[in-house]
Amino acid sequence: MKSSLKTAAALLALLLLLSGCAANIPADTTDAPVIVPPGPGETLPVPETAAPETEPAATEPPETEPPADEIPTFKADLSAYEAYMAPADRDGYLLLVNKTHPIAADSVPADLVYLPQEYAVYTGEWRAQMTSVAAGAYTAMLTELCANGYTDVKSTLAYRSYATQSYLYHNYIAEEMAKNPALTKEEARAIVETYSAPPGTSEHQTGLCTDMHNVYNRPDLELEDFEKTDAYLWLRDNCWKFGFILRFPRGKEAITGYQFECWHFRFVGRYHAKRIYDSGLCLEEYLEQLNKN
Ligand SMILES: [Zn+2]
């Protein structure tokens, strides 16, 4: 499977691969102070800032809005990118495209832009594109990634048209059948669909996701080897700050329909990315929970 992916990419000279996400490990983000129980003969310390006892008791709970999420601290100056990472249209980037939620064949994002060349592997017409807000957030994420010393991650592919997805998908099927002539077309299709989306069901058609890694110039490595790098670990734990999630986490294969993909990151905006990261849910589960509330 892994070698077939690399072979297909090489043969096609497209180097356009899958879509996916990696394990979301919920962060311990609680701000609550750690309370250590008193030992023998000890008493709990009195807080220095105890509220005055004369404070009148509130008769009604105050009407308060939940506190806004704090802007994360970055090494780089990303203030110009804040509106991309945390867009005002908070819920405008939750589009779900998967095998049961297809996207129209003629759907093309209106505002595709090329990613900065320094953060994209290929040039010319093959240079990765995303919608403008996602591209701004991606630029911020890669800028901060570099500021943290990881300078070799780039996008191999982001937006992919229906036609390109169709071309790739059918080539993968042909490749599987060539590799194992005993397979029926349906059997080959079932194999292919564990790693490649049928046309019209790829998230890449939304322009909101990108495949990115640092093994693009390493023929000795598989895509999956990206997971072993420190750059990946940094992205896994920090991508939410820029509005991205790992779209196809390990352990969620039965829900997303895809193998774990450490290289596929999806933009949803920071508000939802933080909640998805903290919860450990995949996008399908998160949206289902959101729709219930
Ligand atoms: Zn992908």
Image (cartoon, rainbow, N blue to C red):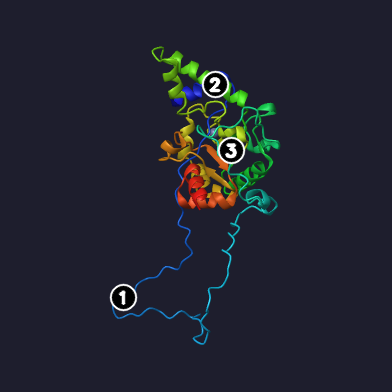
Mark carried by residue 141? none
Q: Residues within 10 Å of mark 3 (few under 14, many from 20)?
A: many
Provide the residue designation for mark 2: 10
Q: Position of residue 26 (x, y in %)?
A: 45, 51
**Quick one: 215 or 80, which is closer to the camera?**
80
Q: Earlier in the sequence, mark 2 or mark 3?
A: 2
Height in image: 199 above or below 61?
A: above
**Quick one: 15 or 284, which is closer to the camera?**
284
Q: Earlier in the sequence, mark 1 or mark 3?
A: 1
Q: Secondary structure at mark 1?
A: loop
Q: Quadrant of residue 154?
A: top right
Under mark 1, the amino acid is: Gly
Provide the residue designation for mark 1: 39
Mark 2 or mark 3, whichever is nearer to me: 3
Provide the residue designation for mark 3: 209
Instruction: Work out whether residue 158 can be spotted.
Output: no
Q: Secondary structure at mark 2?
A: helix
Q: Marks 2 and 3, how far apart in space?
A: 22 Å
Q: Secondary structure at mark 3?
A: strand
Q: Earlier in the sequence, mark 2 or mark 1?
A: 2
Q: Position of residue 235 (x, y in %)?
A: 53, 45
Q: Residues within 10 Å of mark 2 (few under 14, many from 20)?
A: few
**Quick one: 149 or 236, which is closer to the camera?**
236
Instruction: Report the residue that reaches farthest toward the left.
Output: 40
Residue at screen point 70% across, 52% down:
80
Q: Ligand 1: does it lie within 8 Å of the C-beta at label 3?
A: yes
